[in-house]
């Protein structure tokens, strides 16, 4: 039963990783940009959530109403003000600019919030649990997983059933022709980044409720998100959810064997899948 | 003026002057233990090791297109190999440094086979995962102090040289020697046939492939050689520090972020760039380091501005204005006229 428990807890943890990964997957799909600062933006969202809850006394989930649009605005401004200038055939500018951004964000958060670990207080939600078939499941992990499924379903629906999604797919297929058809790709990229950071905000706040965080942990969250994307296969959002679940299960099973092995076994599972299925489990586009 | 009057030259007056000046500076630097204070020598030793790391990263990212944010994997690996080989195998520290390089090359082979499956930016994050695996792996080795790390025993430190002044001079010379070796190796490699292939790949991978260059193999060689050198530099770094822990050994900030800033600010894809970048980085650090996190934010902003406004860095700006090349890599056609401006500058 312990092992079944580890398996189920790992699956639920995978929902959080899928939320980290969905933003990465989205912006890579639309503009082939890999954002090294993604992990630090997750932590930024967690800190914004902390500030909003402590300043207004709102419940963290209610704070999403403020944090999600704020992060979306930051995303749009970041894309139009900075990242659009880096896009092109050359790989280096986007990589190095987002790397610089990551260092700026990390040290900026350190300057404002200090290095002390913080946590978002969500009251009873943190400890509430439900019994399902002999297992005790935390309400928060179950909620996180449900949110992840809903977010990915929502992104999928946006992609294939709205005019915005059509614009995303058009610039993804061919930027120049999309531009000729009257789409302003700079604006579309801005919207894609806004949507990605909106999703990131949800992930960040759920992370902040679940565990304590400090400015230095962004890199680790980027890596988890990245591993979920690659395991699932590029360009496939449901694959990304599956990738997050696989990563989460690998980590909880590893932790069950030896607590020191939790993160390491997640990385090893990723490398194993890279070795046997270099394009991930459910690839849709090639990088 | 016939075609025979033109001739092709690799060198230039600027390069010859630079070589003579560089030789003089080198002699001066070798003599540093007789004119510099202990703190200055320590600082210069650190500067040389950063120069070596930056030159190596530049060879990978600027020439081979392998943008890694995980070179700390080999810095830490080399450092841990120094500790393990001297403490458990009883090797002399200098022998351990050399062996750390060989082991670094061996470790990098399976890593390369695996992460070369990832393209571009995903390759970058893949290298970071590898570095994390190394960090978490070494943190599990209790003989090396686990997560809290260990110090180099006094007997091993003394085996390097019994007197403190001699040890400090030796460690300074090792750092200087490493920097000279790495810059010279990068320079000679880029002038070789392999280097020409590498430059061709950088300029256009598709065209290079169609000319019969084995792209995967060329990049693989660069990755393995760079990793070997990086491991040796890592061993030297921790021979200076005398203490190692997983967080210090595999620090992404210390061994990758700073190195990237050095190369970007100095000029990526040039040999001169890392040298200038290292000098600028240390000048900034010595003046602004008291500001702590603000200093790092300034560094990030400078790197972003340079990348957007002057992607070829400081050296790129200088070169575009004066047509200088201190480490000549390409060939120039020299026109016979008296004001013999280079008629054509082959891409380097």
Image (spheres, coloured by chain):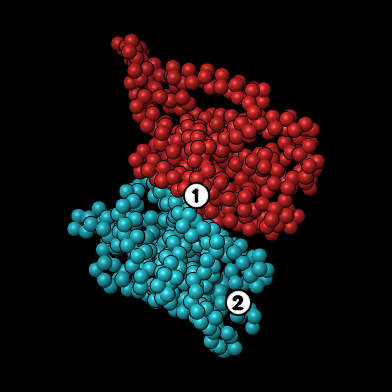
Chain colours: A cyan, B red
The local crowd at label 1, few if under 14, some if 14 to 19, many if 20 or more residues have their Cα within 10 Å, is some
Mark sitting on residue A287 = none
Asked if disc 2 and disc 1 are in contact, CB closer than 8 Å, the reply is: no
Q: Which residue is disc 1 drawn over?
A: B293
Residue A125: x %, y % from top left: 49, 80
Q: Is residue A156 above or below residue B305?
A: below
State the residue in front, A110 or B330: A110
The local crowd at label 2, few if under 14, some if 14 to 19, many if 20 or more residues have their Cα within 10 Å, is many
State the residue in front, A58 or B166: A58
* Point 55% across, 56% down: residue: B129
Which part of the image, by quadrant, shows the C terminus of chain B? top left
* Residue B209 horizontal side relative to residue A117, left or right: left
* Chain of residue at mark 2: A
**Residue B67 can be seen in this image:** no
Callout in the foreground (2, 1): 1
Residue B228's quadrant in the figure? Answer: top right
Q: Which residue is disc 2 drawn over?
A: A6
């Amino acid at each position: 039963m312990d092992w079944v428990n580890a398996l189920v807890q790992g699956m639920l943890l995978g929902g959080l990783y899928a939320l980290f990964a969905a933003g990465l997957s989205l912006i890579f799909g639309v503009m082939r940009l890999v954002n090294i600062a993604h992990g630090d933006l997750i932590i930024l969202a967690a800190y914004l959530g902390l500030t909003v809850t402590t300043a207004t006394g709102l419940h963290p989930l209610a704070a999403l109403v403020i944090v999600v649009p704020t992060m979306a605005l930051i995303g749009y401004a970041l894309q139009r003000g900075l990242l659009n200038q880096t896009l092109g055939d050359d790989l280096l500018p986007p990589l190095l600019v987002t790397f610089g951004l990551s260092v700026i964000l990390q040290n900026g958060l350190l300057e404002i919030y200090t290095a002390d670990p913080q946590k978002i207080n969500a009251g009873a939600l943190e400890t509430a649990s439900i019994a399902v078939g002999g297992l005790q499941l935390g309400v928060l992990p179950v909620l996180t997983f449900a949110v992840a499924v809903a977010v990915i379903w929502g992104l999928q629906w946006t992609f294939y059933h709205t005019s915005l999604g059509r614009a995303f797919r058009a610039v993804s297929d061919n930027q120049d022709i999309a531009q000729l058809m009257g789409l302003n790709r700079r604006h579309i990229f801005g919207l894609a980044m806004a949507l990605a950071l909106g999703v990131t905000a949800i992930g960040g706040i759920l992370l902040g409720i679940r565990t304590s965080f400090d400015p230095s942990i962004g890199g680790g969250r980027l890596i988890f998100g990245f591993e979920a994307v690659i395991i699932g296969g590029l360009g496939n959002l449901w694959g990304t959810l599956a990738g997050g679940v696989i990563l989460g299960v690998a980590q909880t099973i590893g932790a069950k064997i030896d607590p020191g092995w939790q993160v390491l076994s997640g990385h090893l599972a990723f490398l194993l899948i890279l070795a046997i299925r270099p394009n991930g489990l459910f690839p849709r586009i090639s990088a | 003026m016939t075609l025979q009057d033109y001739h092709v030259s690799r060198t230039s007056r600027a390069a010859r002057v630079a070589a003579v000046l560089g030789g003089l500076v080198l002699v001066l630097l070798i003599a540093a233990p007789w004119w510099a204070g202990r703190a200055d020598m320590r600082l210069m030793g650190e500067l040389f090791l950063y120069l070596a790391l930056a030159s190596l990263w530049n060879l990978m990212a600027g020439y081979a297109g392998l943008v890694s944010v995980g070179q700390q994997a080999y810095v830490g690996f080399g450092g841990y190999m120094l500790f393990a080989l001297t403490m458990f195998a009883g090797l002399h520290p200098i022998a351990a440094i050399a062996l750390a390089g060989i082991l670094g090359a061996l470790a990098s082979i399976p890593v390369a086979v695996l992460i070369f499956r990832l393209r571009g930016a995903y390759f970058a994050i893949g290298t970071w995962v590898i570095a994390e695996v190394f960090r978490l792996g070494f943190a599990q080795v209790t003989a090396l102090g686990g997560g809290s790390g260990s110090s180099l025993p006094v007997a091993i430190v003394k085996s390097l040289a019994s007197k403190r002044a001699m040890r400090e001079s030796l460690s300074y010379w090792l750092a200087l020697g490493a920097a000279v070796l790495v810059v010279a190796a990068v320079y000679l490699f880029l002038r070789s046939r392999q280097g020409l292939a590498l430059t061709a790949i950088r300029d256009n991978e598709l065209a290079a492939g169609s000319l019969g260059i084995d792209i995967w193999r060329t990049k693989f060689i660069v990755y393995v050689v760079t990793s070997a050198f990086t491991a040796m530099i890592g061993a030297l770094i921790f021979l200076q520090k005398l203490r190692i822990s997983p967080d210090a050994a595999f620090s992404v900030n210390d061994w990758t972020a700073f190195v990237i800033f050095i190369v970007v600010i100095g000029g990526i894809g040039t040999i001169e760039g890392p040298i200038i970048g290292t000098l600028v980085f240390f000048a900034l650090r010595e003046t602004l380091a008291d500001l702590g996190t603000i200093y790092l934010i300034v560094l990030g902003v400078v790197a972003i501005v340079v990348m957007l406004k002057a992607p070829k860095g400081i050296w790129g700006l200088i070169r575009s204005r004066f047509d200088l090349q201190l480490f000549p890599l390409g060939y120039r056609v020299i026109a016979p006229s008296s004001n013999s401006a280079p008629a054509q500058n082959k891409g380097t």
